[in-house]
């Protein structure tokens, strides 16, 4: 009986876990591309990258090196990491970012593209390297880059046009 009293006291002192807020996950078929990031580099010596995250949480990263060698790697993203990314991209309202209307400032500048398909919202955003390095565009790009780990914009900032 003496053993039951401390056990009962410990059990009564436990707090129930607080419910986690629900993240509105995309309501799309499992093989649907939910988020993708593409950078086709125009600079010699720089790689190109295409990263795709499907609703099944399959993440496929394809890179092309400057010499033309292609490599594709895939992995499954955890449910938690997937939900965090969706929540972050929704919170940043990435689909409200405008695509660029500007002309290329420098011949070697790439025009990365972010595509999002959450079922209830869908968008394609294309901006020049320099535009992806600013404000909310940077936050949207980095949110996905943190998940896939293959970089954000492969080309460094360009200070002057090529001669």
Image: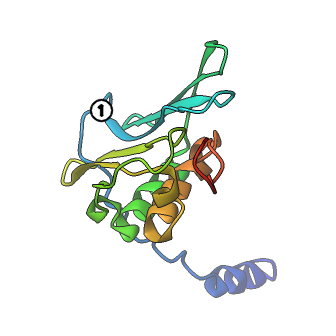
Residue 48 located left or right of residue 100: right
**Residue 84 appearing in the image:** no
The image quadrant of residue 7 is bottom right
Q: The C terminus is located in which quarter? A: top right
Q: Furthest residue to the right?
A: 2
Q: Write down the residue under mark 1.
A: 32
Picture residue at 50% right of the left edge, 39% below the top:
107
The image quadrant of residue 75 is top right
Relative height, residue 149 to residue 89 (above, below):
above
Relative height, residue 34 to residue 103 (above, below):
above
Relative height, residue 100 to residue 91 (above, below):
above
- Please state the horizontal and vertical placement of residue 88, each as a whole percent of the image: 45, 64
Q: Secondary structure at mark 1?
A: loop
Residue 10 located left or right of residue 84: right
In the foreground, 62 or 56:
62
Q: Furthest residue to the left?
A: 120
Q: The N terminus is located in which quarter? A: bottom right
- Please state the horizontal and vertical placement of residue 28, each as a whole percent of the image: 24, 40
Mark 1, residues whose alpha carbon is within 10 Å: few (<14), some, or many (≥20)? some
Q: How many marks?
A: 1
Residue 128 located left or right of residue 118: right
- Please state the horizontal and vertical placement of residue 13, each as a whole percent of the image: 66, 87
- Please state the horizontal and vertical placement of residue 120, each as a whole percent of the image: 18, 54
Picture residue at 62% right of the left edge, 43% below the top:
155
Relative height, residue 118 to residue 29 (above, below):
below
In the foreground, 12 or 72:
72
Picture residue at 54% right of the left edge, 31% below the top:
49
In the foreground, 145 or 69:
69
């Amino acid at each position: 009986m003496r053993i039951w009293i401390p056990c009962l006291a410990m059990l009564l002192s436990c707090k129930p876990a607080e419910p986690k807020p629900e993240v509105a996950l995309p309501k799309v078929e499992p093989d649907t591309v939910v988020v993708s990031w593409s950078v086709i580099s125009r600079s010699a010596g720089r790689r190109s990258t295409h990263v795709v995250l499907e609703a099944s949480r399959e993440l496929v990263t394809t890179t092309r090196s400057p010499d033309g060698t292609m490599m594709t790697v895939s992995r499954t993203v955890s449910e938690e990491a997937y939900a965090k990314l969706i929540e972050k991209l929704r919170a940043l309202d990435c689909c409200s970012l405008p695509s660029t209307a500007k002309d290329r400032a420098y011949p070697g500048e790439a025009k990365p593209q972010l595509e999002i398909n959450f079922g209830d919202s869908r968008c394609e955003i294309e901006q020049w390297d320099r535009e992806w390095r600013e404000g909310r565009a940077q936050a949207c790009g980095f949110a996905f880059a943190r998940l896939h780990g293959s970089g954000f914009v492969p080309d460094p900032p360009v200070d002057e046009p090529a001669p």
